[in-house]
Amino acid sequence: MLSDTDGGVQAQTDAPEPASAGEPPVLEAVDVTMHFTVRGGLGRTTTVKALEHASLRLRRGRIVALVGESGSGKTTLARLFALMYTPTSGEIRLRGERVLPSRGRAAREYYSEVQLVFQDPFASLNSMHSVRHNLRRALRIHGRAGRDDIEERMLELLERVSLTPTKDFIGKLPHELSGGQRQRVAIARALAVGPKVILGDEPISMLDVSMRLDILNLLARLRDEEDLALLYITHDIASARYLAEEIHVMYAGQMVEGGPTEEIIRNPQHPYTRLLLGASPDPARTVKAGAASVFADVEDSGEPPNLAAPPQGCRFHPRCPLATDECRTSFPARTEHATGQWVHCWLYPPGAST
Amino acid sequence: MVKRLLAGWKVRLGVTLFAFFCLLAVFGPWITQHLLHQSPTALDLNAVSSPPSAKHPLGTTASGQDVMAQLISGARESMLAGLVASVLGTSIAVIVGVTAGLAGGVVDSALTGLTNVFLTMPGFALIFVISGYTHGGGPVVIGIIIGLFGWAGGTRALRAQAMSLRSREFVLAMRMLGESRWRLAMVEVLPHLIGWISAMFLGGFVGGVLAESGLAFLGVSDPSTVSWGIMISDSQQGNALISGMWWWFAPPGLCIALLGASVALINFGVDEISNPRLRGASRALVKRAQEARRSKEAAHAR
Amino acid sequence: MPADDPGTLLDVRGLTVEYVAQQGSVRACDDVSFTVRRGEILGVAGESGSGKSTLITALTRLERPPAVTTAGEILFRPGGGRAPVDLVGLTERELRGLRWRDMAIVLQSAMNALNPVMRLGAQFRDVLREHDRTLSRQDAHKRTEDLLALVGLTPLQANRYPHELSGGTRQRATIALALACGADLVVMDEPTTAVDVVMQRQILANVLRLRDRLGFAVVFVTHDLSLLVELADRIAIMYAGRIVEVGSAFDIYHHPRHPYTEGLRASFPPLREPVRRLSGIPGSPPDLRQPPPGCAFHPRCPRRFEACDGTVPELRPVGEQSVACLLYGAGERAGSRGPEGVREEADDVVGH
């Protein structure tokens, strides 16, 4: 977990955060399930079961990472938070009150509190409009600036995302900016409305490697300065570890494990989390052990299932070397540890453990 | 962007031709009256059905009318019809297509249904029948009728483009800022459709000119005016082909063809901009680079 | 000379590839030189604009206008005692003789390069029989099964159409296809970027095992340096069309010499080491149409000094590595200040 206020080089130890203490969540998903009906040829329909019983709480001043591969349901959850769909069951709650996709004023009110930063910096800015247009619209729609001070406010926003000299950047078109710069503009645009929550859907995965850390550092700084609640979605668990206080792991639409970052990294409980950690590139591990051995074990660990016909019970069971009959029939109950870590796996006794 | 557009020879040629015809349309009657001192309708009984000469650079018709004067003043009639047709047709196509593509749901279904009805209607036959009622009525009326029945063709393409733009991330992002639907359509989406719309406008223009001439050929026209289509129709009735009076029908036909070609050339140029692989100029440059390399190697070998 | 050494498979010297345009040429690859030994995995790491993808197309001579190879040699030493050839001078016909048999390529979206209307097995048989006309149907069939088994695919999957298989399976199939004719050199351009982390690990484990068994060399191009440290024997770092550092994976990881390599290495947050604040590299990769004078990295370099904007550094050996940086060698201009002289701190680089 990274704290910007400490500055400099410092190892951070993570104090466990019990789920019940502290402020109430500003945005949460409560037991959300999402099934998409897809119309195939000849009138046949298939149901893609993209998300099952997902719950997630976002609190001010905290960054929560959602880690999973493609098809894990993480983007679906982000879009549900962004009110792009209505959940098949379950609720999205803003400050405890249920919210649904809407139009007009109700939508605007929601979006003045919750903003989404997209994955592709090349697609999320209209190629025909300048930086100024994007920021101006954001400020005007939500009444955050009047005619006299709007230019000043726009330059302030660029200052906050470190796009300096601000006067140079404000008039630029997207194709004149690098990927990292565009993503900063997208973040500035999101900040312009004064949100409480920012949802980042893989915000750095399409950027050049040398620019990624700066964006992560920026997000950490915004968490501290603006007391934002941040959801960081990624397939790269190493960046999740760097940025977030909490990591939640998803597989094939199911949330399988979660808890304080260092606990998950040091002590992964779910077999899938272990597989994910083992598969992620980590030069430090290899250079000591020798290349071949690192790769030896994972050569045939299968692939994620088809969500139109997912396996019964725990969806990871076809690939799990420790699967039992119970795993094949029912989705495991939740096991909670005192450290704040929780997991859905029949390897562990359900309920809270002492 | 306009500079890049004008860089290629195809676009320059197309624009020049098109501009030439536009000027002809605007200044036509003035030119015939004051520069050539001819009238499209005046009869020169001394020179009936005569081939091109000094007095009549493009010869005369069977009734002794100067072909050149007719050609020049006819430009205005034909192109006016084309202009009205394409302005009306493109406007309807944009309104229906973009609304359908962006709105989705019931609105989309209803507008698509409407488009399909107009698509399957035998457009030309209907135009023919209705124009028959109005007895021609001049180029503007003809243009209106053509536009009213011809808008459906481009609408589907615009709808498809609008639909694909609707799910693009920058549109989603602006929607999530709370942007109103009107502004989303006009400010965010429409600028991306300008290329399509202008291509449609130019194509509709030529289509209108062709439709007008087709109608005139079939006899639907205002007898008091002269247009290219009317010239061709008259020449057919005057047995120009059999009598060998090529100067009567060839010039108007050629003008229509050149107008169509100019629009096609402009569209090629726009295509080349959007798809760099079509650029012919770069092949010449590549050859140059390869030659330079070969000569460098030869020098190195020595 | 490396080309005479039978252990050297590929010797690239001074390769320069330019994109020709009306406004002036862009040098996507500038004076690139490196060698690949038989059975070695050479990783090429770089970001956008580094020239790594252009290098791949130039190596396999697949570049198309407006890309033109304007200088350099690619000396390839095929197996079987044949004489080394310069790929740059070959005709299309001669190249066809080499492709697939001696040199194969796996591209980023290779999974989309499979023919959608042919079953997988049929595509293998097609390739095999194209390159060996004497192969009978049964032999081609058997060989197809063997190849698929090499990458962990079953005969059942051979009977399917590409769209019926997952992305990871298709990528594995294309790797098997690349190895179908026993190539000595396999060139891979970001072959695992489009697949998930777990599948990536499977594919690379597979490639390593096959390399050990079949002995081919690999040129592996990617932006993921952390992956190369685990996978490659040697790593070359590219920036703005030039190679700035070459060394063994161990050396590159433990003592990177070029400031760009240091910055790149520090851009990957650790998974097991304690977390501390990292900060990539300020600024962005240069616009190759107007490259900075001297060393292309100097505007972003935390250790730049006076001579850096005047001289383009050459790749020179430093210990076991090769580095193109003025910190490790005298500049070409007389009287320029080398690293032994006063080193100025770089100005704050602002505006990312």
Image (spheres, grey):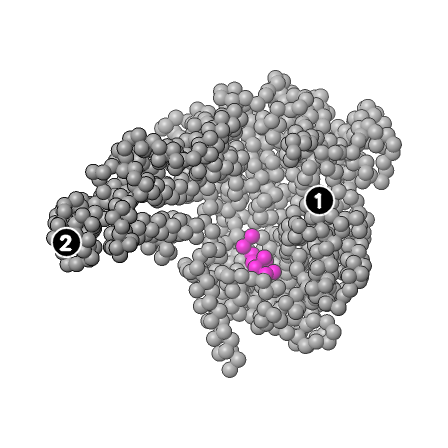
Q: Residue furthest bottom?
A: B302
**Residue closest to the eye, C184 or A239:** C184
> Which residue shows up at 49% across the image and 60% down it?
C66
Using residue A311 as the reference point, say whether residue B141 is left or right of it: left
The residue beneath circle 1 is C164
Locate residue B224: give its quadrant. top left
A61, above or below C205, in the image: above
> Which residue shows up at 44% across the image and 59% down it?
B280
- Helix, strand, or loop for circle 1? helix
> Which residue shows up at 78% across the image and 36% down it?
A316
Using residue B24 as the reference point, say whether residue C201 is left or right of it: right
Both labels 1 and 2 in a single chain: no
- Give the amino acid at mark 1: Glu
Q: Nearer the viewer, mark 1 or mark 2?
A: 2
The residue beneath circle 2 is B47
Task: Answer whether residue B5 is visible to the viewer in this image.
Answer: no
Q: CA distance from mark 1 to mark 2?
A: 78 Å
- Give the amino acid at mark 2: Ala
Give coordinates of residue A144: x percent, y percent. Answer: 44, 26
Locate residue A233: give its quadrant. top right
Q: Examine the structure image and report whether residue A278 is included in the region drawn in magenta.
A: no
- Helix, strand, or loop for circle 2? loop
Dominant secondary structure, magenta: helix
The chain under label 2 reads: B
**Residue closest to the eye, A22 or C206:** C206
| Magenta extent | C48-57
Task: Answer whether residue C86 is visible to the viewer in this image.
Answer: yes
> Which residue shows up at 50% across the image and 42% down it?
A182
Residue B94 circle label: none
